[in-house]
Amino acid sequence: KTMAVALAACLISAMPASGAEKIDVGKREYVQSCATCHGLDGKGKGSFAQALELSVNDLTTLSKRNGGVFPVSRVYEVIDGREEVKAHGTREMPIWGKHYAVGASPRYDDYAYNPEAAVRGRILALIDYLYRLQAR
């Protein structure tokens, strides 16, 4: 139920205001958080990738490397930070789940707010964009 609430919040936040251009929340998250290492195309050739000791994964082949099935749960865990990823450094380095949680504080305090739902919404939007990047 909580995941559904997060997804609904994500979809609502992605809805354009009347007459406004549609916002691709997942793409925005990717460009802001991932493209530096994984590249704008997701193939692992971002501007910062060469400075890392380990090679950066090609995110366009996640499904291919998983028998043709996009590994949603694994991708969620890696982004959130529960899964240890050597290229992300030690746990002292911000992992996206923590990073999103810090930025999830309410702008106004006159309504009930669940920062965990905001974190999940951002991660799910990013996962949706990664799914759309998959090589067909």
Image: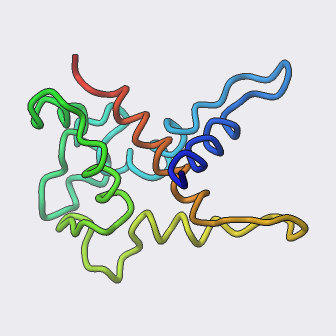
Residue 94: image x %, image y %? 41, 73
**Which quadrant of the figure contains the C terminus?**
top left
Of residue 83 and residue 24, the one placed in the foreground of this image is 83
The quadrant where residue 126 appears = top left
Of residue 134 and residue 31, the one placed in the foreground of this image is 134
Up-down relation of residue 47 to residue 118 (above or below): above
Horizontal side, residue 55 vs residue 72: left or right = left
Residue 53: image x %, image y %? 13, 64
Horizontal side, residue 93 vs residue 107: left or right = left
Horizontal side, residue 15 vs residue 125: left or right = right
The residue drawn where x is 32% and y is 40% is 39
The residue drawn where x is 33% and y is 28% is 133
Q: Residue furthest front?
A: 1
The residue drawn where x is 30% and y is 36% is 42
Residue 97: image x %, image y %? 45, 65
Up-down relation of residue 60 to residue 85 (above or below): above
The quadrant where residue 108 appears = bottom right
Of residue 25 and residue 57, the one placed in the foreground of this image is 25
